[in-house]
Amino acid sequence: MVDSNKQNYKKLNPQYIQEILSKLTKEQNIIKWDIGASSSIDQSVQVDNGIAKQMKAAQRSSITLRVWNEKGLVGITSTSDISEFGLKKAISGAKNASLYGNPNDIPDFSKLAKKSIDSQEYPIKQHKKIQNLLNILIEAESELMSKHEAIQSVPYNGLGESFYERLYINSDNASRYMNRNQSSIYLYARAQENGRKPRSSGAVRLALASEDLDIKGCVEESSSKTISHLDYQQIETNKYLVCFSPEAFLDLILAFSSIFNARSIIDGVSLSKPDSIGKLISVPFFNLYDDALHPGNISSTPFDGEGTPTKRLCLIKDGVIENFLHSEATARKFNVDPTGHAGIGSKVSVGPDWLHICKSANNSIQSSNLSHKVYNNNFIIIEGLNALHAGVKPSQGSFSLPFDGWLINNGEKKSIEAATVAGDIRQLLKNIVNVEDQEFITHQGVSPHIWVDDLSITGEA
Amino acid sequence: MYYDNNTFSSKVNLLQSSTTSTKLVDSQADSLNGHWSGLLEELISYGLSSGADLVEIFIENTDQVSLLAEQDQITNVSPSFGKGAGIRVFHGLLDGFVSTNDLSPSGLKNALDQALGMLGLNSTKSSLTKFQGLKSLKDFSKNKQNWINICPDLDEACQRILEGTNLLDFHGTHLQARRGSYSRSWQEVLIAASDGTFGRDIRLHQSIGLNALAAHGEHRSSIGRRYGSSAKPSDLREWDAEKSAKEVCDSAGKMLYADYVEAGQMPVVLANKFGGVIFHEACGHLLETTQIERGTSPFSDKIGEQIAHSSVTAVDEGLSDGAFGSLSMDDEGMEPEKTVLIKNGYLQRFLSDRAGELRTGHKRTGSGRRQSHTFAAASRMRNTYIQAGTFKPEELIESIDNGLYCKSMGGGSVGPTGQFNFSVEEGYLIENGKTTKPLKGATLIGEAKDVMPRISMCANDLDLAAGFCGSVSGNINVTVGQPHIKVDSITVGGR
């Protein structure tokens, strides 16, 4: 609960929303409805060479209201106007939209929307004064710039705090509510040595509150990465043995998550088909889970857009597709339970939460000696992939992506000036030669370093 | 003018308590008109008297609808509406920005107080100000009041988009998925600032998309086209669905059996229209004062110097009739202009907004833009293009023995050190001056300062294409464009 002497961040009152929507929908002869709402209070700062660059704050709220008309068709409307007037208008808009509802794909309430949830309570902390955030960030920027004389600026930086709340309510008396604090810092440094090109790298940290942020770790990671890219060289276009960092591999898998997305499968835009469950998709020592409630996921939500509880779900086990991600409607089509991955809409979107990649205990690995810390013989470490929105074709399986990384040869580590990695995700998953033991928690999920052989790399000549 | 704190009425968020008044939102909040001037002047005066150098208030009402057709069925209709304000306060070179959905007088004052507090300013330091009040309202919305009613209603919009997906079926082969989409965005804005700026406008943007996924055995291709306009309520009615569907199907068919491109360094010809994304990403962003401020543009000290081949003249403007990036006033209340960025290879101007002018000295160009009230405006592109040259498009192809023709570009981005990348959606091998087999999987990578001098030929077929650009102030509507251009050498990533 919020300390009554301090600012009350809570904007959403589930009981009141339930009452007023019951009244307003009744007035418009709507019997069945549900609503997803969110509200947030944020503040953030950016700095530039020891002074404030921009300070921002925002109060946001939004609702998406869904109604079923007398023919059972669904319509929605979204608005940021959460006054009674706004809700009335939204009901009316949703009712109109329901005239165009798709009779072949009608969403329903999730049968799990009223299932009890053992959700963890998080203490709600007051935001710092914005001047305090500013001082923290100025100090972090200064520390980062003092790490190496080539680091001349930290052009992309930010420190923010937010309080957010979410709810789901339906006319069948399902009611879910959660709130949380979250804080983040990012520091992207730019370094340049005489006569050489500028180089940039950075780091991000998330925590529930700003006092819990690992700022020192963020500064260290940002500086060490940036400095490690100062000594760069071009590489030859060729096929290489590649070691993906946990961040890079998670990014790649997330970009192709339509493989596991039941909505995409039904729509015919996934590489998978309804009968892909049980089929081999990767090497047998590779496991993949979606685990919204993983303790490392500070953005975890106990329920999805339809009120379904979130949970750990196995997607690939020993290289075989085990499950798909579902909403209520897709689950009904596949005759399974919803998995807690839905949004809210007349056509409900489906998406992953928090991926966990790990080595399978059941199958041995031929190249288990490959370790990014020890191995030193002609391979590439991909630290981060860029431009995923442009270079990935999820429905075709192909990717061609610029990356930041290093070439390791005879024990020497050289940053790569500019290069792209290209391939097909289906081939890549079958060309994995090692899944390292040590797992790392990133802001996208958990993964160890993953080794893939025979990947095409284009260098810039 | 002096502002008294008590003149703001308090208003409680209706969702906080069931005992709150059920009074509807002020009718004033539903129409952004001159009636707001009194409240806005009070707020601005209060801000100035608290020590601010400049106070700017941006208020918007929005009404949007998007719909999706898949195969021969409308599968999603999503209306949305909203309102909100963004308040920005400048003090010296610093600024504080606060956004809120609460347009009540007390909600706006709370936001202003928060913005002032960020800069260490508050009313206890106040003194009477010399604020002269707002100028008379510059109303660009006078002839636009009826736009939303002229736009196709949902029935008509659904029919038009279904016509598109039906035509994909008619013209295409091996199509596994057909999609058509339409979005209509109506935005009413009111902008007031302590320099007297007081403007009102109504913006209307519509976009139409057609996508096809072709599949045959292991072969796959996906092709999409997007069309967009501003200030043209009848645009969807006038859309040539037949031509669009034929174009998508033709490309999807050709790319279905395409080989992967062989990576390497080679000359390329980039087609007109959306080919202009290369200039937008590779160079345009580096000419925004937001980049100059950060020190991340290699062009920051190059005004008057040659940065591109002498064949290149590039322009950014907000004036082209009906273009997706056109506007009557920018999001800081300034009328747009035609800004010549590069003339015959020489750098002329940067794109600047209010903060950019303050911090870099480059004069505003009517380029202050934002996605919505939740973002502070920043210098952003509008309609950006390389101007036409004198060559015929085929002459560019004929000048290459072995290279790549990029007929259609996918998306792209530019990194913090100026390195760019673009995916090629539809490419063809150029052999001995002729386009031959289709190629897929190509990515163009490089740096603007290296590539701009290599644009050696510009054709005479300038054309524009609509797109969305994401950057510091959110996603905004833009136009990219160019004639066919030849880049003498660029890195092509592939397999």
Image (cartoon, coloured by chain):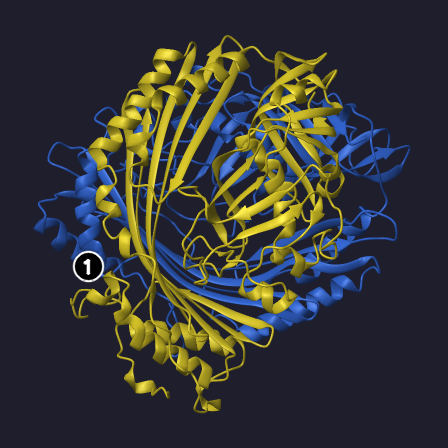
Chain colours: A blue, B yellow
Query: Disc 1 designates what residue?
Result: A85
For mark 1, name the chain. Answer: A
Q: Nearer the viewer, residue A372 or B392?
A: B392
Left or right for A228, reference B196: right
Within 10 Å of the Cα at label 1, are there few (<14), some (14-19), or many (20+) other Cα atoms? some
Q: Residue at x 53, y 29 (%)?
A: A256
Asked if residue A445 is positioned above or below residue B225 in the image, the reply reads below
The secondary element bearing badge 1 is classed as helix
Residue A44 can be seen, yes or no: yes
Left or right for B115, reference A246: left
Residue A99 in the image: x percent, y percent? 17, 34
Q: Please state, as top left, top right, bottom left or bottom right, where the C terminus of chain B lies in the image.
A: top right
Q: Nearer the viewer, residue B364 or A138?
A: B364
Left or right for B46, reference B29: right
* Three-letter residue code for mark 1: Phe
Q: Please state, as top left, top right, bottom left or bottom right, where the N terminus of chain B lies in the image.
A: bottom left
Asked if residue A143 is positioned above or below residue B439 in the image, the reply reads below
Residue A284 can be seen, yes or no: no
Residue B196 in the image: x percent, y percent? 42, 74
Residue B434 in the image: x percent, y percent? 66, 12
Q: Residue at x 60, y 49 (%)?
A: B340
Q: Nearer the viewer, residue B57 or B239?
A: B239
Residue A413 in the image: x percent, y percent? 85, 39
Q: Residue at x 64, y 39 (%)?
A: A386
Left or right for B81, reference B174: left
